[in-house]
Amino acid sequence: MPLGVLLRPRTAALLLLLGAVLTVGGALFFEHVLGYVPCKLCLTERVPYYLTLPLAAAAALLPRRASRLTLGLIALILLYGAGVGVYHAGAEWGFWPGPADCGGGSAAAADINDFLKDLAVKQPVDCTKAAWIFLGLSLAGWNAVIAASLAAFAGLAALSRQPSTGPHQPGR
């Protein structure tokens, strides 16, 4: 498929929606299937994708100009997400300190007794320790790459002046 077709607002919005779904789905897979407990920064890194989901869905339905503006907003949100990923990965590699208040994202206890038992045995997840590394990058590093790539794509689509997809779609 030619790049021009991919940069059409509706197509780009749907691809961004798919990218956000796959990224969040991957994070949830690691958490709920493989048992990795996310740290505070891991949870923060998901927020841009959670914002991208409804915005990309809306951009796919909006008129061309509003869609392009929404794609620009998505690009900025995902750029922020890439920055959080770089910060987190840098803290994991010891390039700079991580947040002092970083703790785990484990499930809430059912009652106060379970909570007190959990406090005695569970250690909070440390934001400066990579739980998993693939091809030299941690999950935070991969998040930075994915968010930056999606941000660049959203920005290109927002700035692209592709022709409309057909006469049946005025303003697209």
Image: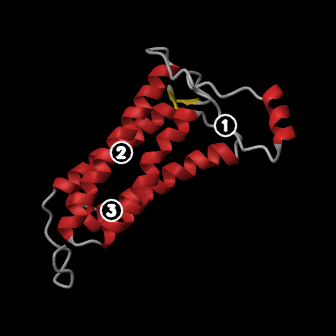
How many neighbours does mark 3 have within 10 angstroms: few (below 14), some (14-19), or many (20 or more)?
A: many
Q: Circle 3 is placed at which residue position?
A: 13
- The quadrant in which residue 2 appears is bottom left
Whole-number angstrom distance, CA of label 3 to CA of label 1: 31 Å
Q: Earlier in the sequence, mark 2 or mark 1?
A: 1
Q: Measuring 63% from the left and 29% from the top, which residue is drawn there?
A: 103
Residue 78 is tagged as 2
Q: Measuring 21% from the left and 51% from the top, which residue is drawn there?
A: 156
Q: What colour scheme was applied to this rendering of the protein?
A: secondary structure
Q: Is residue 74 above or below residue 61?
A: above
Q: Is residue 7 visible?
A: no
Q: Measuring 61% from the left and 37% from the top, which residue is drawn there?
A: 38
Residue type at tag 2: Leu
Horizontal side of residue 33 vs 49, given as left or right: right
Q: Circle 1 is placed at which residue position?
A: 37
Q: Secondary structure at mark 2?
A: helix
Asked if the residue under mark 3 is in contact with the one under mark 2, i.e. CB atoms within 8 Å, the reply is no
Residue type at tag 1: Val
Residue type at tag 3: Ala
Rendered-image quadrant of the N terminus: bottom left
Please provide percent x and percent y for residue 61.
31, 73
